């Protein structure tokens, strides 16, 4: 203990000496210093918005910023934005119906299961061991409830019906995409990072978007360093250094799944509303 405090004391003394000999700290940046700041050396906005310390599910206020940038990146027409808005409303409606149906279907199962668990709880509180002979009846009851997977099949059927209806409704919007818009659809990773991060979730990213790395390709180490990639709002620069964005048209199934994930994002509706307003302002022109 004494040796530990001696070491701490020496370290503190050295820190005081270094502090006394150090040069006075520079003042905070003035207006002149900010004016001379080399903006080319600063991280582009899209990189700052994409870079997060962790991968949580963002709320609507955070996600809507990224989605609006992506919508402008796609350059969707007003008609396409209207279709996407209708599709978003349909997806919300289907999800709510699925959730409501699941709650109704699970009520009977929960009631029966809870009754058994309540009996187990009473026995355990009375100090009886888990392998008590009287516990055998409870084990049998739980096995009977879960045998055959009837409950799981019922809930899965409800989910699949809702998801299928949304996937079918997506076709009208997807058919309006130009080849360029279709290729830019994959840049939705800009706000889907918590689900499709190329580093955190490489398998999911590759399955839906493709690969940004070929074995033995040195260029991947410098990806994102060119002037084109560092443009302030060049979302595609996250995945490619030179235009056009790498990769051909997405496979139809991948487009559908990717769009379904987009429709799950909480900030989609306000972002669409803002994009529609911007398109309308372009049409109307300056007042």
Image (spheres, rainbow, N blue to C red):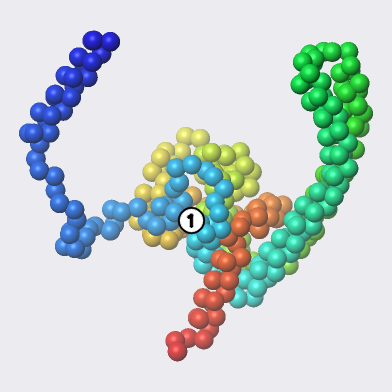
Residue 136 x/y as whole percent = 89, 18
- Residue visible at 47% across and 57% down? 235
Secondary structure under the numbered disc 1 in the rendered image: helix
- Residue visible at 88% across and 23% down? 138
Q: Is residue 207 left or right of residue 65?
A: right
Residue under label 1:
236
Q: Toward which corner of the image does residue 167 lie, by quadrant? A: bottom right
Q: Toward which corner of the image does residue 80 lie, by quadrant? A: bottom right
104 versus 78 height, above or below: above
- Dot 1, how many residues are within 10 Å of its Cα: few (below 14), some (14-19), or many (20+)? many
267 versus 225 height, above or below: below
Residue 162 x/y as whole percent = 80, 55
- Residue visible at 55% across and 54% down? 59
Outermost residue toward the top in this view = 2
Residue placed most toward the observer, 33 or 83: 33
| Residue 233 visible, this orientation | yes
Residue 131 x/y as whole percent = 82, 13
| Residue 184 visible, this orientation | no
Q: Is residue 196 left or right of residue 131?
A: left
Q: Toward which corner of the image does residue 95 lie, by quadrant? A: bottom right
254 versus 116 height, above or below: below
- Residue visible at 63% across and 47% down? 208
Residue placed most toward the observer, 118 or 263: 118
218 versus 165 height, above or below: above
Indicate the quadrant containing the N terminus: top left, top right, bottom left or bottom right. Answer: top left
Residue placed most toward the observer, 132 or 194: 132
Indicate the quadrant containing the C terminus: top left, top right, bottom left or bottom right. Answer: bottom left
């Amino acid at each position: 203990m004494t040796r530990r405090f001696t070491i701490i004391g020496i370290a503190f003394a050295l820190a005081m000496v270094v502090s006394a000999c150090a040069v006075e700290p520079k003042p905070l940046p003035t207006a002149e210093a900010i004016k001379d700041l080399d903006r080319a050396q600063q991280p582009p906005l899209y990189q700052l918005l994409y870079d997060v310390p962790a991968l949580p599910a963002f709320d609507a206020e955070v996600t809507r910023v990224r989605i609006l940038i992506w919508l402008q990146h796609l350059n969707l027409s007003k008609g396409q934005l209207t279709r996407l808005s209708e599709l978003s409303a349909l997806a919300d409606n289907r999800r709510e119906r699925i959730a409501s149906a699941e709650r109704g279907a699970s009520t009977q199962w929960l009631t029966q299961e809870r009754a058994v668990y309540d009996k187990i709880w009473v026995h355990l509180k009375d100090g009886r061991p888990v392998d008590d002979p009287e516990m055998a009846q409870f084990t049998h009851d739980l096995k009977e409830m879960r045998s055959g997977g009837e409950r799981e099949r019922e809930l899965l059927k409800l989910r699949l019906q809702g998801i299928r209806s949304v996937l079918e409704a997506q076709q009208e919007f997807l058919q309006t995409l130009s080849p360029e818009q279709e290729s830019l659809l994959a840049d939705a990773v800009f706000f889907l990072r918590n689900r499709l991060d190329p580093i955190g979730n490489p398998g999911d990213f590759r399955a839906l978007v493709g690969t940004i790395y070929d074995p033995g390709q040195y260029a991947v180490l410098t990806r994102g360093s060119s002037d084109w990639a560092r443009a302030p709002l060049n979302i595609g620069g996250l995945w490619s250094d030179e235009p056009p964005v790498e990769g051909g048209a997405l496979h139809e199934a991948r487009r559908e799944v990717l769009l379904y994930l987009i429709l799950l994002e909480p900030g989609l509706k306000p972002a669409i509303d803002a994009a529609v307003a911007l398109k309308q302002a372009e049409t109307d022109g300056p007042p």
